[in-house]
Image: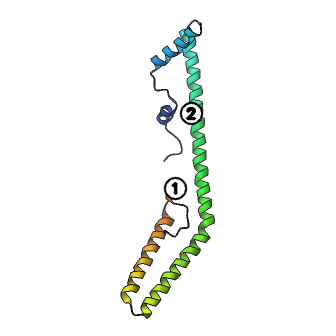
Amino acid sequence: MTDRLSEQQLAETFDQFESPETRQARWENAALAAGREVDRNTLRVYMAVADAELMKAADDWANAMSASAAKVRRLKARVAELERPAVEARRAEIRQSFTELIAQAEQDRDYEGAFEVRCRLRDREEQWAREDAAPLDLRIIGDGTGL
């Protein structure tokens, strides 16, 4: 996703979805209702100024949204950085648990069970690698254990 919104997206967001003719007629009706004489040249100038103000507001809005999105990305990165030691500690606990299960299974001569636990550990390691490689937007902030 780009940080800048396209002009079409801005127009769709801020436009009243009316044709220029309909819009001009609406402005003329508003002027007549207020008891003012309608000067089409002046009306075009007013409409041009209103359009410029609308586009300025749309640009300001787009810039604010881009800045907010960038701030959210920075904050997510900071949270991930701060949580990293806890995540690694929890992963180490899980690895140790699997390793102890494998050792116990081999001691009991349950080679099939040891193989199954090794496969589960390998799957968990692959899952952690995918989580670490995922962009921040797709990560779920949590304990990182994949549970």
Residue 124 vertical position relative to residue 66 in the rendered view, above or below: below
Please tell me which residue is depicted at 53% across the width and 10% down the height of the picture: 40
User: Where does the image place residue 111, in percent across and percent down from the top left?
Assistant: 37, 89
Q: Which of marks 1 and 2 is nearer the N terminus?
A: 2
Residue 71 screen position, x and y as percent? 61, 50
- Placement of 45 over or under 5, stated as above or below: above
Q: How far apart are marks 1 and 2 (CA)?
A: 25 Å
Looking at the image, which residue is at 49% across and 19% down? 23
Which mark, by number, is residue 24? Answer: none
Labelled pair 1, 2 in contact (Cβ < 8 Å): no
Q: Which amino acid does label 2 sit on?
A: Ala
Position in image of residue 42 (x %, y %): 58, 12
Residue at image position (42%, 93%) is: 108
Q: Residues within 10 Å of mark 2 (few under 14, many from 20)?
A: many
In this rendering, is residue 106 above or below 93?
Answer: below
| Horizontal side, residue 49 vs residue 26: left or right | right
Q: Callout 2: helix, strand or loop?
A: helix
Q: In the displayed structure, does residue 60 sit left or right of residue 138?
A: right
Q: Is residue 112 above or below residue 54?
A: below
Q: Residues within 10 Å of mark 1 (few under 14, many from 20)?
A: few
Position of residue 120 measured from the top left corner of the image (x, y, whole percent): 42, 77
Would you identify the image quadrant in which residue 80 lies? bottom right
Q: Residue 137 — which label?
A: 1
Foreground pick, 43 / 103: 103
Q: What element carries label 1?
A: helix
Identify the amino acid type marked 1.
Answer: Asp
Per the image, the residue denoted by label 2 is 58
* Residue sitting at x 49%, y 65%: 131
